[in-house]
Amino acid sequence: MLHIPLWKRIVIWGLCALGVLTAAPNLFYGRVEGHNDALVALERNGAMTPEQEAARAAWPDWLPSNLVNLGLDLRGGAHLLAEVHVEDVYEDRMNGMWTEVRDRIRDATGTARRIQSPPDELRVRIGDPAKMAEAIEAVRDLASPVVTMTGVGQSDIEVTGEGDTVTVRLSEAERAATDDRTMDQSLEIIRRRVDEVGTREPTIQRQGGDRILIQVPGIGSAAELKALIGTTAKLTFHPVVSRTTDAQAAPGLGNILLPSADVEGEYYVLEQAPVVTGEELVDAKPDFDQNGRPAVGFRFNPTGARKFGDYTAENIGQLFAIVLDDEVISAPQIQSHIPGGSGIITGRFTVEESTNLAVLLRAGALPAEMTFLEERTIGPELGQDSIDAGRIASFVGLAAVVFFMVASYGLFGVLASVALGLNIAMIFGILSSIGGTLTLPGIAGIVLTIGMAVDANVLVFERIREEMKTARGPARAIELGYQKAMSAIVDANITTFITAAILFFVGSGPVRGFAVTLSVGIVTSVFTAIFVTRLMVVTWFEHKRPKTITV
């Protein structure tokens, strides 16, 4: 006969209460969002403004404060599609190898001189062509195996010789591995930069071989996002060869000519190979110099600190250029040995510029330049229109379902409608708890779930009708109705869940948002239909003890 143990009733109602409680903050979205932003500001800065204090107090700390994040199409924001110039990394790799290649060839042949070559190659002229074999063998000793997820592959460089010229280039396997590393590094650095400004649930994902899709809800415009992401923030420290005012001056082989960021018309000739790079930075923060002007303090890791310290000790009195994105922002004279690996970058900064530069340096330098192929700004008004349209669709669908359920099944339809309300609350509660993002297709998934949620109840109620014709009493009819409808309910929802899983793993962007809400809706629908509605029916039956029931 009908019987549900007390512990099971407590668990069912407890889960329902938990779902309602975790969904409740979304009814006070602006207030809770302000409270969360104030807590983030406190954690990041160690203090809050009076406005942030008021925002924090607007929502009790002891209540849940997780929200369903609104996607780009609901909140508004910026959309960018960027192409990463992965070939830039090949040139940097060749420049970085030059010192070691030169020393190896000199030891083997006596002389080595770099000559003009494509960006992805390193060509070196030797003095004695008869020693070409020795030169090639010496350079090949620099090779290392290409390590990938599938194991250790071929050598990372190819070394050939023709006449008196040794040519070094990256192997195809190393190019592919370098491309993957470059894209992964770019993705991670973009994610760090976006996270630094406190945006919620950005979409940052690789598309194809060399493109990155970036969608950031809540940011003002695509131009603002480009300014944040597009700056490579490539920091290097170079020895200064000379200064000049001639923009067309020939820097000489192995040197580069870069403009000064402070003095218009002034240029520096620098050694191309940097002493230290920004990759060896472990910290950067806004600071002030000895004259009280905004600056950026930095600190190197042990490797960078050792290189920085050794160079300053050996070159006291020389100029040392600090280069950011191919501009010399400062070229101080080395006054003394600088141990410890820390220093300060001075320039004509404002406080805001020094703060932004510190953010970029902390996040790391982009390994290669990016070109933005597509950019869109979605205004918050459009997002609000989408929310309003989705809300209307949800209410209309909900009202229609409730009307037909009550009209068709009477009291049982009322109980199913109550369970439907709990179902929707649990969907939002789960999305809030997991930090899910709600998009316009996601709203469509919720609307679809509203219609699907009562399917299981319809199967049960129709089965109860059939059992009332043959079963001995209403209690037995209710019990058999739930038992015999169970297989059909499970089969129907499993197939839908599999479809949602395929959409999630194969799709991207809005399609995945639809799949997430649909999957969550399936789980909560089955729970409310099998457990919640049944518990309400059993509770009613125990209280009324009717001799017959009308479904």
Image: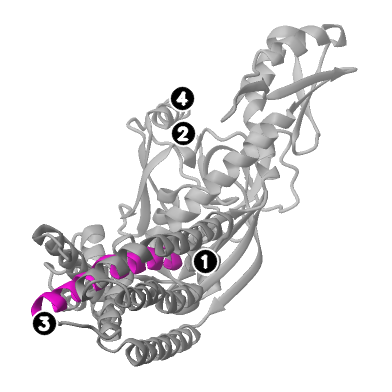
Magenta stretch: dominant SS? helix
As drawn, the label of residue 69 is none
Which structural element holds mark 4?
helix
Looking at the image, is mark 1 or mark 3 earlier in the sequence?
1
Q: CA distance from mark 2 to mark 4?
A: 9 Å
Viewer-nearest of discs 2 and 3 = 3
Q: Are marks 2 and 3 in contact (CB under 8 Å)?
A: no
Q: Position of residue 491 (x, y in %)?
A: 45, 60
Q: Tell me the CA gap for discs 2 and 3.
A: 97 Å
- In the image, the segment drawn in magenta is 517-544
- The secondary structure type at the circle numbered 1 is strand
Residue 532 part of the magenta-drawn span: yes
Helix, strand or loop for disc 3: helix
Residue 445 horizontal side relative to residue 541, left or right:
right
Task: Identify the residue under disc 2.
Answer: 317
Which is more toward the observer, 404 or 327?
Answer: 404
What is the crowding at mark 1: few (fewer than 14 residues within 10 Å), some, or many (at least 20)? many
Q: Secondary structure at mark 2?
A: loop
Measured from the top left, where is residue 186 in percent x and y? 54, 49
Closer-to-camera residue (263/492): 492
Using a 10 Å C-alpha cutoff, classify the residue at mark 4 as few (fewer than 14 neighbours), some (14 to 19) or many (20 or more): few
Name the residue tied to disc 3. Answer: 544
Residue marked by disc 4: 314
- Looking at the rendered image, the disc whose residue lies closer to the viewer, 1 or 3, is 3
State the residue position of label 1.
215
Q: Position of residue 6 (x, y in %)?
A: 9, 61
Residues at discs 3 and 4 in contact (Cβ within 8 Å): no
- Under mark 4, the amino acid is Glu
- Give the mark, 4 or 1, whose residue is nearer the N terminus: 1
Question: Which mark is nearer the camera, 4 or 1?
Answer: 1
Q: Hey, what amino acid is under mark 3?
A: Lys
Residue nearest the observer in this picture, 328 or 317 = 328
